[in-house]
Image: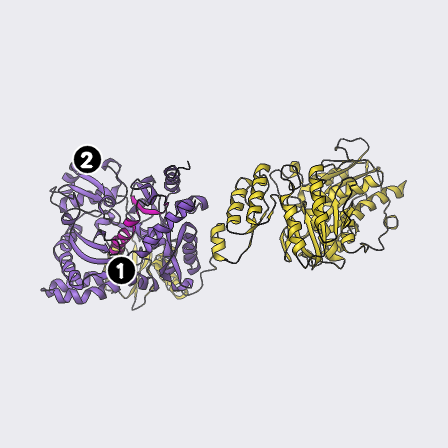
Amino acid sequence: MERIEQANEEAVGRMLAADPVLIDVVTAGDVIDGLGEKVILHAGPPIDWADMCGPMRGAITGIAVFEGWAPDLEAAEEMASAGAFEFRPNHHASAVGPMTGMTTLSQPVMVVENRKYGNRSYCTVNEGLGKVMRFGGNDAEVLDRLRWLRDVLGPAMGVALRDTGGIPLKSLVARGLTMGDEMHQRNVGCSGLMLRALAPALAKTSTDTKALSESLAFIGGNDQFFLNIAMAMGKAIMDPVRDIDGSCVVTAMSRNGTTFGIRVSGTGDRWFTAPVEMPEGLYFPGFTEADANPDMGDSTIVETIGLGGFAMGASPAVAGFVGAGTAADAANYTRTMAEITVGENPEWTIPALDYLGVPTGIDIRLVVETGLAPVINTGIAHREPGVGQVGAGVVRAPMACFEQALVAFAESVGVA
Amino acid sequence: MSAVIVNEVLRGFYLDSVALLRMSQSLVALDGVDEAAMMMGSPSNRQIMADAGILDATGEAAEAGDLVIGIRADNQDAADLALKEARAILEQSSAAKGDGEVWRPRSVRSAVKAMPDANFALISVPGDFAISEARKALRRGLHVMIFSDNVPVADEAALKQEALDHGRLVMGPDCGTAIINGKPLAFANAVARGSVGVIGASGTGIQEVTSLIGENGGGISHAIGVGGRDLSDAVGGFTTMMAFDLLDRDPATEHIVLISKPPSAAVAAKVVDRIGASSKPCTVCFVGGSEMSLPANATAVTTLKAAAENALGGSAIGAGFDPAAMAVPASGGPMIRGLFSGGTLCAEAQVVLQAAGEAVGSNAPVPGSGGLDSKGAHQLIDLGADEYTQGRPHPMIEPSVRDDALTAALGDDSIGVILLDLVLGFGAHDDPAGYLIRSLGGSAGKPVIASVTGTEQDPQRRSAQIAKLEDAGITVAPSNADAAALSLACLRSTT
């Protein structure tokens, strides 16, 4: 018991000591080991083509066309089912990706360095709202935007970030929490703060005012621009927490649209998976829950570090996706998540909760004991390939993941 | 069918997108409306509205800072009505949406976090989990009261040993009553604070004694429930011993009352030794027990009433109460039928009848009583026993448990008097007198004798309950023991 408590304290200590800094945007294939031709990193635990949901397949075929591996979507689908592509989870490559989470060699990825521990993590640039690849969109408009990100915004951000020497993220997130962001569904504040930090360097390093204008407009027009940065930050914070002997703190939560998987510090790189659940939420006009795909994406890394559903108290509007949606409901989500965490983060606090720190360090024992599964704020994709986002809502991590993990963890510490 | 699309743009009107999505739902629910939404007019939102077929040229011209109302309806009237509704919803948007649920901790761990200076936990969970929750509380330095029952006795003993090691008190399992620092816990009464400390293995026993003391000018320092099995051989009186230690050290406690069923000889000897070591006068009430020799600082009594009187320094409870004078002649047969919600009250009544030379049968017999099948014996039934409460609430909470037995007794010609208890206090039914009167449904046809365990400060107010009973022709005695004596007097006044 004492050994576990100490190991968990160590785990949370490493989370709180992390110093994540956004330092660069680079080409994915240049920094991610083994990310060569026809290798596709995806969200969630490992999955084969046969088991992938509609939007995941839509994104796979789209990215294959984008990378020039297939002439069109039909050909890409045939290649995929014939086993022409190698699928690997982002999490196995120091990366994360929202929703479908496509990461391939020629895409630009943002680099977050954890300066306390020296590790780096990667995430693609957020595509904005509307029809986008992360929700399974794959038409010409989607692919053109990816090309623009690759050819214009990505390189421009890379030059600008190198010029700044890096933008520290911890204090930026702290300010975002006071502005109503929870960093999963709400990134308005942090996106604005990031634009403020980035704009002078973008202007200074730009040689093309049209491209500069487009870049600034793109960032300024995308309320979720910061989400992918928050995700890379989450991965950079959690990777040094892996493999602490005797710790039952969750180091990753992730879903591929079919299964939900978690990893636990003391049980290393093993995934504990269960069928993913259906979000409860609100739908855009023209869509209903019948159109919805189950929960998807690596974005649950933000809940893993105490943001998203865990920080709902900072973002009362988000609580409106389910139930009465009052500010008190939002606060209750945060207080309830404190039931299943080792501690609170004194640097990330919520003014409306008397500066309560966000609940930090999910302890699988507490999840199983209280029956309180982590709350996740999420977007909802259409279940068919190519359509895109149809709503947003709240979902719980499946309890079965934590039950399996607890049994395996007990074996690992010799109490089973 | 020609659908009508109506758009309205509110310039510079910002509302949160989630709030707008929520509000949009009530528009879609209106009759004749196919699809509707309210969104901020950003390009991506306008695209969504166009895809949904609810955007016209008006909405198309909106800008990101404008709010767009888009409605597609079967006809113009339905569309106009929906637009009116949309405007109304937007006007109300700042109004309160109702009370949010108050957050409550869901585990011992977070309860302690929320209240770091807490030193006491009341545990009421299914028995299988009670020990594990109690242990969590103990390890966080809390004293524990376990309301839960169905806990294996070996677990109880182990837990109490652990509590002793931590220097913490474990009251229970199956501890239904306590008053700590003037705070009634679980089924307990609002009793004035005072100098009498009570240690009890029985819930209604503690309630009767503390209420009688409180209603007769005394008060309670602490009433510590120990759980029904604490004085068994298997547990060995851990909590009782510790309760004596606590009350001995407590300067507010001047007199200690111990209430229990008769313990085994071995445990009784241990208890007697502990009493002898106490510096304070003690009253010992082993309900249904035989004579035993006690140290000089202790007095043995046989009833709860006598225990209260002794703790009050010998002053009589129910002064002026004369069973013979108050007796209502019994009609019908020669037997008393007792229908009790309190187990110890049932035991006390058996003791009173036995002492008067009567034969008694019970489903919860004290020494000297037979079973319910005993021939020619008064039947005193504990309706709180497992066979009556399986899968239903205790009769103190839900008096309907008594209904069938009451109907049977009323129709039984061999029964001359019906004897009842009503238990008030926190956790109990909010009007047991009213319920009883409705169950009797007018004239009972034979005397009904009752006692009311409780105080004036209880939520049900003792005097109000008594007045109700008396108005309905039910005779109320000052205590449970007096009610038993009065029942007998009623029988004897006929012969």
B489 left or right, relative to A191: right
Residue on which the image places disc 2: A81
Task: Write the start and end of the magenta stretch as one range.
Answer: A227-256
Find the distance from the CA under tag 2 to the CA under tag 1. 41 Å
* Secondary structure of residue under mark 1: loop
**Chain letter, colour purple in render:** A
Return the x and y of residue B382 as percentages of the image width and height: 71, 40
Q: Which residue is mark 1?
A: A169
- Whether pointer 2 and pointer 1 mark residues with C-beta atoms closer than 8 Å, the reply is no
Q: Position of residue A172 (x, y in %)?
A: 28, 62
Which chain did the image draw in yellow?
B
Between A349 and A373, the one nearer to me in the picture: A349
Which residue appears farthest toward the front when viewing the image? B277
Q: Chain of mark 2?
A: A
Q: Amino acid at mark 1?
A: Leu
Magenta-drawn stretch contains A249: yes
What's the residue type where badge 2 is placed? Answer: Ser
